[in-house]
Amino acid sequence: MTGIRRDRPTWYAYAAMFAYVWGLYGMGPALLIIRSDTGMSRTVASLHSTAMALGFLTIGLVGPRITARLGRIRTVRLGTASIGIGISVLILGGTPWLSIPGAMAIGLGGSMALNGLNAFLAMHHGTHGPGAVGEGAGISMLGGIVAPVALGAFVGWGINWRVAMLIAVAILIVADLARGGDAVYAVGYRAPHAEQGSLPSAYWWAWGAMVLTVSVEFSFVMWAGDVLRSQSDASTSLAAASLTAVACGMAAGRLLIPRLLRRVHVEPLFRAALVLPLVMWLPMWLGHSSSVILACMVAIGFGLGFHFPLGLARMVTASDGHADLANARSSLASGAAISIAPLALGTLADGVGLHTAFVTVPVLLVAALVVAIARPVRV
């Protein structure tokens, strides 16, 4: 129907991305539980996202050299190993001195794995590459749905919540064992080290839009549970699972991307996806009923779901054929966003309250919309 050839390498990419997002979206609720148990401040909790962002930034700078030395699939495998180690250290460390480095390992590994896997999907599926990237992002978001629910359910049932996070590690191991031969993953590979400085200005405008949209996404990843808990009488277990509302919306949006791209071009779809969460933010911000807030989070998540896949497709399109380098440099966008936005929001929330601090979200969305309209990507 969509023209996407879902062979074994494609399913390996989807599974690895699914496990990564499981760990990523489980981190916010996990830190919410840890803060409840230890009294950790929002500022210290935000340092975990900053550490993860440092991992993204590091790979954005040195990733092309790593990929040039190891090749695409070995870089991906190194990344998935780092994700597994990072998740294990994050949840078993018991102290910020261990959990923060664990978050950084997740950032390092996630950046290496996603860069290679998205470049592979874009090249492996040819003209259906944007659809495959979107479908992979949608399937991976199912991990973002399940992880917060699992953590919240385990807390409610009296089961150690760490078991829910370790499931992601198990998925990474099984996926790696079933990945098949390595040769197919090199399709369309161009050594990034030979392409330094070759990305055109159109790419960097698309890169700037990515910084803004990732800032919004991770503001919700880190603080959606606190928003629900601070504005309503939601329990800790419900607040821990609230990110599922955002993730459900994101998964639905991303799974629709291949179908919608058959009828609508990337640019108008990207702009519409910026407007929806901007409109739905106000009733969420003013709401005091947990059901109303959760419903708004689903709608906001639906819009957010389009941002990363379409933003990445815009960057690859604007890169003049340098998919691996474009994906590597996208880590700088993610790293810049994650290092600044959640920490700034958390620090601001410690000073003026989370409700007031969350006004930064529509500001970021408006800025992204202005950039997208002023500097569209030409196909």
Image: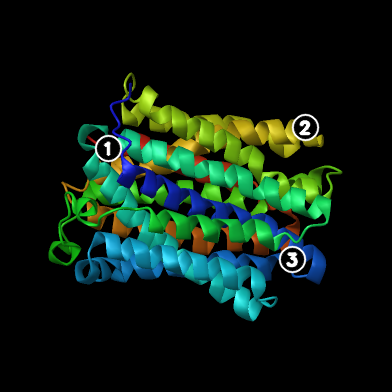
> Which residue lies at the image location 68% right of the left edge and 55% below the top edge?
29
Q: Nearer the viewer, residue 156 or 240?
A: 156
Question: Which of the two discs, 3 and 2, sits closer to the camera?
Answer: 3
Q: Secondary structure at mark 3?
A: helix
Mark 2 residue type? Ser
Q: In terms of sequence position, does the residue under pointer 3 or pointer 2 come before the other?
A: 3
| Amino acid tagged 1 | Gly
- Residue at 27 percent of width and 70 percent of height: 66
Residue sitting farthest toward the bottom: 97
Q: Which label was assigned to residue 291?
A: 2
| First-in-chain label (2 vs 1) | 1
Badge 2, how many Cα within 10 Å: few under 14, some, many 20+? few
Disc 3 designates what residue?
A: 34
For the N terminus, give its image quadrant: top left
Mark 3 vs mark 2, CA separation in Å = 25 Å
Farthest residue, direction top: 263
Counting other residues with Cα less than 10 Å from the Cα at mark 1, is it few (<14), some (14-19), or many (20 or more)? many
The residue indicated by pointer 1 is: 129
Residue 182 placement: quadrant: bottom left
Task: Farthest residue to the right: give it.
Answer: 233
Residue 373 percent coordinates (x, y): 36, 34
Q: Does label 3 or label 1 sit earlier along the sequence?
A: 3
For the C terminus, the quadrant is top left
Image side of residue 241 versus residue 180, left or right: right
Q: Nearer the viewer, residue 15 or 376?
A: 15
In the image, residue 8 lies at what x, y percent?
A: 33, 44
- The x, y position of residue 370, in whole percent, is 41, 38
Inter-mark Cα distance, 2 to 1 = 37 Å
- What residue do we see at 74% from left, 68% from top? 41
- Type of amino acid under label 3: Ile
